[in-house]
Amino acid sequence: MKKILAVILAAAAVSFLIYAYLTIDKRTDDQLVAAFVTDGVQAVNEHNLSKVMDMVSDDFKTTDDINVNKSHLRLLVAQAFRGGSQFSVQATPITTDIEGTTARLKVHVSVSELGFQSKPTEREINLTLAKETTRRLLFIPATKWRCTGTDSLVLDYDSGL
């Protein structure tokens, strides 16, 4: 009976390791950074605060005179999501510069309020990303691109965005 249990546990462990290996993200850094922008837009359009904040590094800070850190950003994003207006975001990377574990992006962002015929707010923002160590499947080391800063966080208090 103990041998059968040991064989079953060994088979489960081997199956888990095979699954972990087969599900490793094998995309290039360029593809992962492009996916970062796409996933971020999707998370914002879904008003998914957890997903948005998972894309932000604990070391996040802006370099403008507002000086926003991750906890302040969380409050701002939650406020925008809870605000009365519904909005849609579109983003297109303009330039991408990847050097090792750091990436710098210039992204054209367009925010439009749904249900209104007003002109969308359009900006070019600069993002700095870092490849950070994380865990997947609870204990397997992995890396993930996260935003560590921006020099152009734009807050439009008139429109609630």
Image (tube, rainbow, N blue to C red):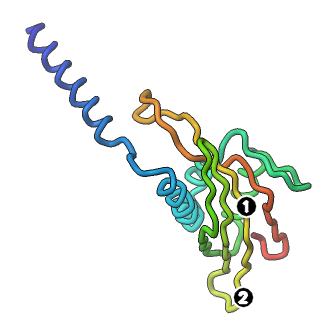
Q: Is residue 136 above or below residue 63?
A: above
Q: Residues within 10 Å of mark 1 (few under 14, many from 20)?
A: many
Where 144 sits versus 135, above or below? below
Q: Which residue is painted at 43% across and 27% down in the image?
A: 139
Q: Is residue 81 above or below residue 13?
A: below
Q: Position of residue 106 (x, y in %)?
A: 68, 64
- The kind of secondary structure element at disc 1 is strand
**Amino acid at the residue labelled 1:** Asn
Q: Quadrant of the C terminus?
A: bottom right
Q: Nearer the viewer, residue 26 or 39?
A: 26
* Residue 31 % position (x, y): 47, 57
Identified by mark 2, the residue type is Lys
Mark nearest the camera among 2 and 1 is 1
**In the foreground, 132 or 4:** 132
Dividing the picture into quadrants, the one containing residue 90 is: bottom right
Q: Return the residue at label 2.
A: 119
Which image quadrant for residue 150? Answer: bottom right
**CB atoms of marks 2 and 1 within 8 Å:** no
Residue where numbered disc 1 is placed: 126
- Image quadrant holding the N terminus, namely top left
Separation of disc 2 and disc 1 at Cα?
Answer: 22 Å
Of 145 and 8, the residue lying toward us: 145
Name the residue furthest top: 2
Residue at point 62% right, 82% down? 114
Residue 68 located left or right of residue 114: right
**Mark 2 / mark 1, whichever is N-terminal:** 2
- Left or right: 66 as drawn, with respect to 108: right
Q: Residue at x 20, y 19 (%)?
A: 9
Residue at image location 76% in from the left, 57% down from the top: 76
The spot of residue 6 in percent (x, y) is: 16, 13
